Image (cartoon, rainbow, N blue to C red):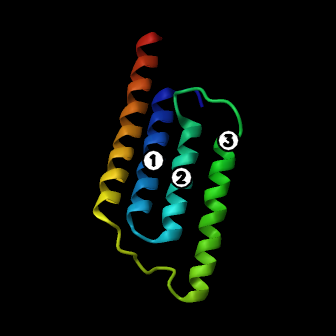
Amino acid sequence: MEHSGIKLMIHSTLWALGVVLMLLGITWLMFLGLGLIMLASFFSSQRRTGGRRLAAFLFYAVAAAAILFRDLHAGVAFAQEALPWWFWIVIIGVGLWGILSELGRWRKTRSLT
């Protein structure tokens, strides 16, 4: 993918979807949200090497599937858990930090070309 605007849009969309899934308060959706955030790093403007991102995405996706099957068996797959107030602050803060830092890197690369 060569167009940096499209990469920024895909990165931001995956980040936002990941954060929204995490905020729903369902355990397996939290892990799926973390996996989407790891997947978003493939579209980052910052060059990273290694397979750790793919391994992290696969870990969170497999964990989400395992927890979903466990919760389906127990009958609580779509039951929300009460989350503490600090969880909301941390998740929103990390989400905003991730999007704003990616936007800042994107702007730098746009000004260099």
Mark 1 or mark 3, which is nearer to you? Answer: 3
Sequence order check, earlier mark of 3 and 2: 2
Q: How many marks?
A: 3
Cα separation, mark 1 vs mark 3, equals 18 Å
Local SS, label 3:
helix
Cα separation, mark 2 vs mark 1, equals 7 Å
Residue 73, image x and y in percent?
Answer: 61, 87
- Residue 3, placed above or below residue 37: above
- Which residue is at the front of the view, 10 or 40? 40
At label 3, counting other C-alpha atoms closer than 10 Å, the crowd grade (few under 14, some 14-19, many 20 or more) is: few
Local SS, label 1:
helix
Q: Amino acid at mark 2?
A: Leu
Question: What residue is at 37 percent from the left and 38 percent from the top?
Answer: 97
Q: Which residue is mark 2?
A: 36
Quadrant of residue 107 in the image? top left
Sequence order check, earlier mark of 1 and 3: 1
Q: Which mark is residue 15?
A: 1
Residue 8, image x and y in percent?
Answer: 46, 34
- Which residue is at the front of the view, 71 or 41? 71
Residue 39 vs residue 15: left or right?
right
Question: What residue is at 50 percent from the left and 57 percent from the top?
Answer: 33
Q: Which residue is mark 3?
A: 52
- Residue 27, placed above or below residue 52: below
